[in-house]
Image: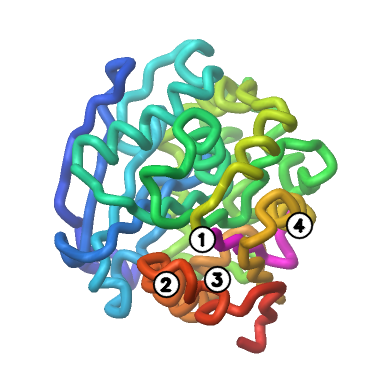
Amino acid sequence: MTSASKTRPSGRRHRVKTADGIALEVREWGNPHGPELVLVTGVAQSYLSFEKQFSAPELQKFRIISFDPRGHGLSDKPFGDQWYQQGTRWSSEVQSVIDALELRKPVLAGWSLGGRIVRQYLVDYGDRQLSGIAFLSCRPVEVPEVIGNGNAVVKKLDIDDLASRIDVASAFLQNCFGLQPNADEFAFALAYNMLCPFEIRQQIGKWSTEPAISEAALRRVTVPTLIVHGRDDILVLPGAADITARHIPHATLSLYDGCGHSVFFEAAERFNNELVRFVDACRDPASVAGTVNRRALSAAS
C-alpha cells in the first residue's frame, strides 16, 4: 500500500477525565496560542477523521483540538446503556475538554453524531463559553424524516460474526462518502471504525433527545453559526440542515453539490477555506455575514 509509510501529524496528546470518570483521548495541533477550534467526530469514527483539517497548512494558525468520544478510538469503552443514553454524559465530554485544556471561547464544530453532541452541549451549557458553532452534516433536531436510507446497512447490529461485522462497517463507511476515498484512505478509516465495538454502537443508537428540547436550545444560540451539508448525503438528508437553519435565523447555510456525508473530506479545499474565514470572523461576529455568504452557498464558490 502506497500510504503505509505516510507520516501523519500525531499532534500533542492529552488524556482528559470526564465528570463520570471516562478517559478521553484528546489531540491538538497548530498554534497553541491561536484561535481555538474543537472538532467533534461522528459515530464509529475518530479524531483521525479530520486529518485533512489538522494537516492543512492554512489551518495551522489555529489551535485545533479533537478527541475520540467515549466508546471510540483510544478513549475508554465501558459497556452498558447507562454510559451512552444520558445526554449530559456527552455534553460533559466537551466541557471536560474545554476545562482541561483551558480553552478560551473556542469554535465548536460537530460532524454527524458530533453535531448531536454539540447540540447537547447547547442544551446543557448554552453558548456563553463559545465564540462560534459549526454543524457538519448532522441532525441536531432528531426527527425521523431526515434519516437517509443509507442507514439501512446498520439497522441490525447484534452480529456475532467478525466477517459480517467488517462487511457492515465497510458498507456504512462507503455510505459516509458521495465522493469515495481512495483504497488506502478507505482502509485507514475502516481500521479506526472497527475500534468502536458493535455493542457500543447499539447503545449509542438508543440515545435521543426530544425535538422540542433541541429546538429550544437552537433558538437560544447567539454566537455565529455555520451549517454545512452535502446535497447528496444519504445518511442525514439535507433537509436536516434546513431545519437547523430555521431555528438559528442568523446562521450561514453552506450546501455542497456532489458531496455526501463527509464534506470536510470530499471537498476539503473549499471546506477548509470556509472554515478559516468562519473561525477568523468569529473573533468579530459583526463581520460573519460578510465573510461567509449568508445563505445556501453552492459548489461554485
Q: Main secondary structure of the magenta part?
A: strand
**Residue 46 numbered mark, or none:** none
Q: Are marks 4 and 3 in contact (CB under 8 Å)?
A: no
Name the amino acid, label 4.
Answer: Asp
Mark earlier in primary sequence (3, 2): 3
Q: Are marks 3 and 1 in contact (CB under 8 Å)?
A: no
Location of residue 284 (image quadrant): bottom left
Bounds of the magenta span? 225-234
Can see residue 167? no
Label 3 to label 1: alpha-carbon separation: 24 Å
Q: Residues within 10 Å of mark 3 (few under 14, many from 20)?
A: many
**Residue 242 numbered mark, or none:** 4
Helix, strand or loop under label 1: loop
Name the quadrant of the C terminus: bottom right
Kindly give the residue lying farthest to the right in the view shown.
Answer: 145
Can see residue 220? yes
- Mark in the foreground, 2 or 4: 2
Q: Are marks 2 and 1 in contact (CB under 8 Å)?
A: yes
Q: Is residue 229 left or right of residue 54?
A: right
Q: Residue at x 62, y 27 (%)?
A: 205
Q: Residue at x 56, y 39 (%)?
A: 119
In front of the other: 62 or 215:
215
Mark earlier in primary sequence (2, 1): 1
Q: Residue at x 46, y 53 (%)?
A: 109
Name the amino acid, label 1.
Answer: Pro
Where residue 247 appears, as percent x and y from the top left, is 71, 49
**Residue 281 numbered mark, or none:** 2
Location of residue 169 (image quadrant): top right
Where residue 179 appears, as percent x and y from the top left, is 62, 71
Name the amino acid, label 2.
Answer: Ala
